[in-house]
Amino acid sequence: MNKVLEVENLRVSFHTYAGEVQSVRGVSFVLNKGETLAVVGESGCGKTVTAKAIMRLITTPPGEIKSGSKIICEDKDVLSMNEKELRCFRGAEVSMIFQDPMTSLNPTMIVGKQIAESIVIHRELNKKEAFNAAVKMLQVVGIPNADKRARQYPHEFSGGMRQRAMIAIALACNPKILIADEPTTALDVTIQAQIMELISDLQQKLGTAVILVTHDLGVVADVADRIQVMYAGEIIERGTTNEIFYNPQHPYTWALLQSVPNLSTDNKSNLYSLGGTPPDLIKPPIGCPFAERCEYCMPICKEAEPAVTKISETQEVSCWLKHAMAPKVEKPKILNKNI
Ligand code: SF4
């Protein structure tokens, strides 16, 4: 597969009065052409900061992408781009949709014009042609009466339609990569499914690679090719969707899977909830960042950072349980893809 994006040893910090918060701590991964990579983890694990770093949307100060970090998009070094190069890069190469379409759309401008604006920047069309192209994009993302809708304001759209409009803006210039940051969090469950289906359909039609950032493993089961689980600014497990759902190796991945409701969940029983809180990233722990919340924690876990163990060609995990000397533990009954 051809890679479209390579992130290597990405480290991002935020300088606060309390100290330097190390939000992303040495993240590396590759995104291949046309695939969907899900980045999963709870709030504050660094997944959105990673996505924003790829778009070069980290505000400096207080943010800082640390030296030694590398983001390469089709042979272009994203971290050394100047403002002019970044304007071409955003939209034409990589686009992003955010979780709340209401705050991402301009409430004072009709939707068609907002889509057309991004088209004018990246394609050689005049304003009228760009507006017509915007109407076409609204049709592509499944908005009925697109010609009329293009002349309406965001407040005249439902939540699902606003997210469709955001997707239209993001895909208007046919980017190679679409980053979707919790794209369905603010939507009803039925609309969530429609939006995920739309992203997946468009990806197949346009060949766009997608990075899907979410806290909800249930959202990614049917759409992701690969999954990366993040915790405390690090990737702690990665694998194909099947590997993560059917053969997960890290206790945190087990906890995430146990907390997803499925069809066999008894409606009288409580869903699994993971106790404790993630570590303070101003002073990250020396050993495993999950140690304080892990029921399998061993003395070594608090003394040294777990090495990465390869489970297969595509799956790897950072956990001392995979060490040859570690005691064998029985995995909890993990939920599967019937969610
Ligand atoms: Fe738990 Fe230790 Fe594995 Fe960390 S390294 S997840 S503390 S068993």
Image: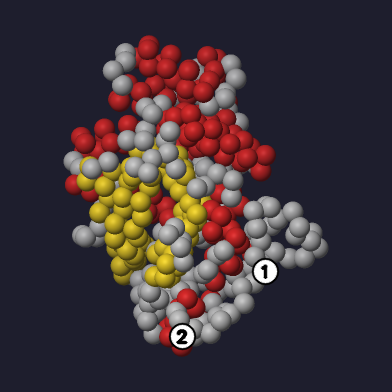
Callout 2 secondary element: loop
In front here: 234 or 188? Answer: 234
Quadrant location of the N terminus in the rendered image: top left
Image coordinates of residue 114 in percent, x first then y, are 42, 25
Residue under pointer 2: 325
Residue under pointer 1: 333
Callout 1 secondary element: loop
State the residue at coordinates (53%, 53%).
241
In front here: 247 or 294? Answer: 247
Three-letter code for the amino acid on which mark 2 is drawn = Met
Q: Residues within 10 Å of mark 1 (few under 14, many from 20)?
A: few
Image coordinates of residue 51 in percent, x first then y, are 38, 49
Which color scheme does this rendered protein use?
A: secondary structure
In front here: 79 or 160? Answer: 79
Answer with mark 1 or mark 2, whichever residue precedes in sequence. Answer: 2
Image coordinates of residue 144 in percent, x first then y, are 60, 20
Q: Please, which residue is most extreme toward the front here?
A: 313
Q: Is residue 58 visible?
A: no
Q: What is the spatial separation of the Cα atoms under label 1 and label 2, in whole angstroms?
A: 24 Å
Mark 1 or 2: in front is: 2
Q: Which mark is residue 192?
A: none
Image height of 41 relative to 290, above or below? above
